Structures are given as structure tokens and as C-alpha cells.
Image: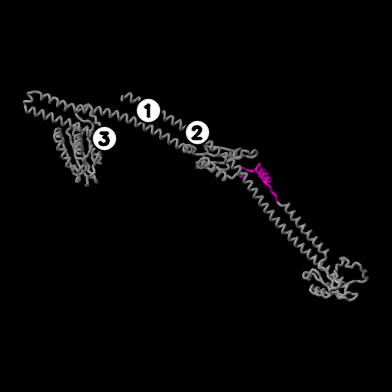
Amino acid sequence: MKKRSFWFITVLMTVALLGVFVMQLYYIKEAYNLKSQLFDEQVNQTLATVVKKAERLNVANHINRKDAENKLKRLQDARQRALDIKDLRQQYVQEAELRQAERENQIENYLNQQDSIIRASYRAPNVISETEFVSLSSVNGSSLDLQMDAIIDMRSLILKGYSMRTKPYAPPPKTFEFKSLQSLPDTLRYLVYDPRNAKPLTVSVPKISDDLEKKFKREDEIAKKKLELKIAALGKDTFSYTRLSLVEDVSKELEEANVPIYKRINFEALGNILKTELLTHNITQKPSYKVSLAKKDSTLFIEASNSKKEFLPENTYKTPLFGNDLFRDPGTLIVTFPNKNSAILSNLSFTLASSIGLLLVLVFIFSYTLYAILKQKKISEMKTDFINNMTHEFKTPVATIMIASEALKDPEVTEDKNRLKRLANIIYDENVRLGSHIERVLSIARLEKGELKMENTAVEMNDLIVIVLDSMSLQLQKRNAVLHVNTNAEKATVFGDELHLSNVLYNLIDNANKYSTNVPEITISTRNTNKNLIIEISDKGIGMTREQSKRIFDQFYRVPTGNLHDVKGFGLGLNYVQDIIKQINGNIKVISEKDKGTTFEITLPLYEG
């Protein structure tokens, strides 16, 4: 990809990302405004509901109080009426007792008068019992039976039909006394003798005459009627309170102009109603609220959810408590939400999360796309370098083989056996060199595809290091390399493929040898830590920067050496080393400093089988 095309794509993607970002901000802003309006509407609806319920609660409190007063009044009146009725009934009983005493006195007078008449009219009168009367009646069936019922003038005690006496008269002693009247029968029986012929007769006198009985009955009816009238009069005087009267009284109370607002409303009940209605409208934030007078700045009650007790204008809502009150101060309910923005944002949590998530995904895709493009661009450049290097590496042995082949066509050369043998050796060595290059490229390809088969066995790394160094002795001696070998690990056996492990050591030692400007000084050491084997390969060569150290294990990457091209390679060696180490569950890291040298540290698990 050309540099111009890359920047064009980058600019387009950046503009698109910024456009999406701006649209998301606009969408979030509009959603916030919408949620804010909805929050305001919910709060205003809540306050309207609270005020209505507060007014109804105020009326209900008056009605309940007045109803309670009425019930108490009715109860007191009922108790007083019961006491009055009890007194009337006691008075009625007392009057009845007096009437009864008076009646017994009248009966006593009546019986004594009758007795006097009988004694004056007959001889030897004698009161007999009912049994005696029955026996006499059965013996003297034809005897006279008189019924006495004389009319007496109670004032003069003079018998009508008789002449008046001309001398003082002393009444005879009473035959019947008041106390003995209860035991008398309903009819008194007398045994008398006729003064004309002395014939025995029986006389019957009723205990109570018909006139007296009618009189007594009439008096009882009159007394009972008076009692009923008095009780009925008490009932008319009893407190009577209808629902209409109750409503009228409550209405008068509510219209009283001198009742202050703190007596018209229960602040605690108002707070409870406010909190309940806010929760009903899905507002969970605890508000601060206060009640003040509408006509002057005077706070009657305040409850704040924070210590500052601030009522910010943008977060505050007001409503009159008694809006229909024309004669008194209606009062004002003021509610504020200190954290209104956080409450609105909490309702936008899903929207914000989705928007932020979308933006993050887009940023990630944008970044990853740029990263992939840059990486592919670098890989393309490194592949170009790799092809150039590979072409150069392949061209040299091919050219050498071609020259040797052309020399073999010369008859003089073929006749010289030494020259022929020398040319044959050159062709063989160059073929081996060419084959090793091809095998290295194929090994990397097989590693990428996972087709490289590892023939793992127990490998003694101390011995393998010595073997590799021996095979590299010629090229090390060519540069007069100085070796320091410290194979101090007591346990150096690992489980891996010996061939590939030897290639790993060869690549690292070869790099240490190639990237040393002066006489190479290479140190190889082994040691044990826990259950691992540590192999360190150090040099004092050109070293690397930190950025270069992070990339040396990438495919095709080669540390730049300026205009010098004396160091040959494909940029595949260290990538191959890392893949082989990972295949046997090991780890490799590099410590390098520019112009001071490089150390590769390999960690391999020990073989315990």
C-alpha cells in the first residue's frame, strides 16, 4: 500500500470516527434533556399529588377530630341521660312506694270502716277464715251471705242514711292495722247474727273495693305516663349531630382566618407522603424539602438530606400547599434534589454504557485496523528485504556452482584431477549451503502451520553445548572469538528434540559472533533454579535499543546496521528459536544495551522421567 493511500484511509476513518463520536454526544445530550424534562414532570406531578393528599389529610384530620369530639359529646350525653333516667326511675320507685303506703292506709281505713258498719249492723261479728267460711256455707246452705260495700264520707266519717249523733263520739279501736294488711286474703269473711232473729249469717267484704282498685290503677297509669314523658323529654335534649352538621362545622373551621399554617398541617405526615409519592414515580433520590410562608420569607419547617442545607434554584421545585385558600397564607412546599444530575445520569446508565461501549468498539476497530495496516506494511517491507536477502543468499552459491560447472567444461581442467576434485568440493559445499537455506525457510513454514514434528527425547544440554561449539569452531576461529563456557548446572537434562535444540544454540551463538564489531567475546553458562534449567548466552557486541529488543523475535525482522551489509540473514532465526523453545514449554528473554552487548536467557523445564 502506498503511503498516500494509507494516509487517505486514515483520514477517512478518523473523520468517520469523529462523526460517530459527535453523533453519540448529541444523542446523549438529547437523551439527557429528555430525561431531565421527564424528571421535572415527575417531580411536579408528585408535588401536585402530595399537595392534594395533604389537603385531604388536613380535612380528614379536622373531620376525625370533630367526629371524635362529637362521639365524646354523645357519650357524655348518653351517660348523663342514663343517670337522669336512673334518677327518674328511682324517683318513680319512691313515688310508687309512697303511693303504696298511702294505698295501704286507704285500704286500712276502708276495711276498718267496713268493719265498723258490720259491727254496728249485726250482733257479735267475728272474722273467720276461708276454710271456716266454706264449712259454714256447706252446713247452712240457705244462710244469708251479705256483700258489704258501704259508701263512707271520709271527711265526716258519717254513715249516709243515719241521723247525726248529738253527743261526742269516740270511734271504737281499729280491727285492722297497716302491717297486717299484707297477710289478709282478697276477701274478708265475717260470721254475724241477725239482730232481728239472731240467725247466723256470713258477710263478705272485699279487701279492696272496685272504686279503690280503679283509682289505684288510674294513679299507676298516670305515674307511668309521666315517667315515659320525662324520659322522652330527656331524649329530645340529647346531643344530635348529623353528617351535614359535621361538614358545616369542618368547613367553618377551615375558613377561620387566624389559624396559622403549622396548625393546619402535620409536617411529619407531609414528609412521609412526599417520600412515598417520589418512590411511586420511580424517583429514588432522597430530597431536601421545607415549608415556608408564601407572603413572606419565613421558614416553618426544613429537612435537608445534606449538611449544607442548600436549595439550588436549578434543582428546586415549588408549589403552594393550600392553593384554594383565599383568606389565609397558603404556604409553599419547596423541594430540592442536591444530586439531580446524578439521578438523571443513573437513569441514562444503559444509554451511556451502550454509547461508550459502541465508541470503544469503534476506537478499537479503528486502532486495530491502523495497527494491522502498519503491521502488514512492515511485514511487506520485511518480506521484501527477506526476498532480497534470500535472493542474494541463493544467488551466491548458484553463481559459484555455475562457474564451477563451466570450468568443468574446460578439457584442461578435467585432465587436472586436483583441480577437478577442488571444483567438485566447491559444488558440493555450495549445494549443502543452498540446501541449508532452503531447509531453514521450510522449517519456519512448517512451524507456522503446526506441521513440524518434534522427536522429543532426554537431552543433556551441557553436552549439547559442547557439541555445537565444536561444530562451529572453524567460523569462531575465523573471527578469533573468545569463549567462556561455564556449564555449572548439576541437572541439565531436558525433554526435547536434540536437532532443533542444537539449531537454537547455533543461531544464538552465531548471532553473538556476527553482531560483534571487534573480537567476539561470548559467554555461555548454565545453572539450576527450582525445577528449571537456565541457559545464558552473552556477548559484548553492538547491542540493541529497547524498541529493537521488543521486535527481534518477529518474523523477517533484522536489527538495522546502517549501510553495512556484511551481516547476512533472513530475519527468521530468532523467530525460529522462540517457536522451538515454546514447543517444549520453555521461555526465552533478551537483555540488551546499545553498544554494550546482549544476553539471551533460556528457561527450560528439567526432565524428571
Per the image, the residue denoted by label 2 is 34
Q: Which mark is residue 582?
A: none
Q: Mark 3 or mark 1, which has the lower sequence index?
A: 1
How far apart in space, not on screen, are marks 3 and 1 (Cα)?
34 Å
In the rendered image, which quarter is residue 107 located in? Answer: bottom right
Amino acid on which the number 3 mark rests in the picture: Lys
Task: Tell me the crowding category of disc 3: few under 14, some 14 to 19, or many 20 or more residues within 10 angstroms, Cα based.
Answer: few
Q: Residue at x 11, y 30 (%)?
A: 425
Q: Position of residue 125 (x, y in %)?
A: 85, 74
In the rendered image, which quarter is residue 590 located in? Answer: top left
Front: mark 3 or 1? 3
Secondary structure of the residue carrying numbered label 2: helix
Secondary structure of the residue carrying numbered label 3: helix
Q: Residue at x 76, y 59 (%)?
A: 224
Per the image, the residue denoted by label 3 is 449
Q: Position of residue 360 (x, y in %)?
A: 39, 34
Q: Is residue 249 magenta?
A: yes
Q: From which residue to which does the magenta span run?
A: 239-263
Amino acid on which the number 2 mark rests in the picture: Leu
Secondary structure of the residue carrying numbered label 1: helix
Q: Mark 2 or mark 3, which has the lower sequence index?
A: 2
Amino acid on which the number 1 mark rests in the picture: Met
Per the image, the residue denoted by label 1 is 13
In this orientation, does residue 591 appear? Answer: no
Q: Nearer the viewer, residue 14 or 308?
A: 14
Image position of 479 (left or right of 87):
left
Image position of 250 (left or right of 408):
right
How far apart in space, not on screen, are marks 2 and 3 (Cα)?
56 Å
